Image: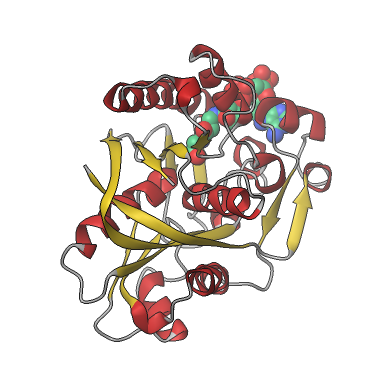
Amino acid sequence: MSAPKILSTGRCLPARVVTNEELSKTVETSDEWVYSRTGIHARHFCEKESGLDLAMGAAQQALDRAGLKPEDIGVCLVATFTPDYASPSMACLLQKHLGMLEDTLCFDLNAACAGFLYGMKTAHALLRDSVRPYALLVGCEVISRVLDMTDRNTCVLFGDGAGAAVLCRDEDAQWHTVFGSRGDPESIWVQGPGPDKAAVHMEGKAVFRFAVEVVEKSIRQLLEAEGCGINDLDLVVCHQANARIIDHVAKKLKAREGLFYKNMDRYGNTSAASIPMALDELVLAGELKPGMRVLIVGFGGGLTWAGALLKW
Ligand code: UT7
């Protein structure tokens, strides 16, 4: 199937780092509990920054690295479940503040932690008929805004951040994808709107079971479509919710050590931002290079899941 090409990436995090140690002063928890159950040591929380500040920072980096200007973009999508406003969309705000042209197709999409891959699929479809051949896709979340900081079951898990990518049409690029959704407002949900009501609720064990099921299944489907084995891949980048989910799947698939990337120790679960932030880190570290075979999987609220196997 023809695929979009990722030309560049970017990332932006709020300045404030909140450690497990700090959280343990306000809720009954410990670094030992959180790290051993999730692999998370710290996360960034917005203090002064808005979601738009994060999205702008990540988007500007991605544009600069692609050598493009805002006027070159034909499609602008923001994947988020924590936008600054219900309306205008984050994408419309980005259009104005970055200076994209008024005929740029701008909107937000909400597929929770699978949002970046849903965004790639959407951008790819829209680019076929776009006024200009480049799309800007941003995963941006300010989850601290919807956390109940007295609920230790959820407040230790999430973080804020943004990751961005510039995509272009590429007639030669190929990928395999899988997408799924399962309407379920009981395993993970965010009540809203309204500051008193807006909080993340999660049945952790149910979401854990769902995650290991769909991540393993998606990877197996993508490997079968590609006709290769797990250890023929160069890299697997999963949504960074919990190190134990990733380790469990890697073990079941008999993946070699280090194949599955993990960075939730520093960022927590940043939902739609986690995959583009991880891709950006890998590119900058020189660990993700052109020609590498990469498998990406997202999963989360909705419930939603998505996977893609592509050549970088
Ligand atoms: O991006 C969306 C996708 N989300 C996910 O993938 C999350 C999936 N789920 C998980 O990652 C795990 O289920 C959690 C990390 C959320 C929880 O781990 P768990 O091993 O399933 O723990 P649990 O919820 O069964 O809780 C075990 C105990 C409970 O105490 P009791 O009832 O056994 O006395 C909890 O109250 O741990 C307690 N607990 C905590 N203790 C210290 C729950 N949260 C905390 C905490 N600190 N922060």
Quick check: which quadrant has ligand 1? top right
Residue 28: x %, y % from top left = 77, 36
- Residue 93 position in % (x across, y down): 41, 78
User: Which residue sits at x=21%, y=56%?
Assistant: 125
Front one among 16 and 204:
16
In this figure, what is the number of numbered marks?
0
* Residue 183: percent from left, percent from top: 27, 36
Q: Residue at left 48%, top 49%?
A: 290
Left or right: residue 304 versus residue 253 is left
On screen, residue 143 versus residue 104, left or right, reads: right
Is residue 280 among what the camera can see?
yes
Q: Is residue 274 above or below residue 261?
A: below
> Would residue 89 be visible to someone looking at this image?
no
As drawn, 256 above or below 105? above
Q: Quadrant of the N terminus?
A: top left
At 54% from the left and 49% from the top, the residue drawn is 279
Q: What's the residue at 39%, 26% (across, down)?
A: 219
Q: Look at the picture and state if 283 lies above or below 167.
A: above
- Residue pushed farthest left? 129
In the image, is 286 to the left or to the right of 249? right
Q: Which of these two is toward me, 264 or 81?
A: 264
Q: Which coloring applies here?
A: secondary structure
Instruction: Please provide percent x and percent y for residue 131.
Output: 20, 76
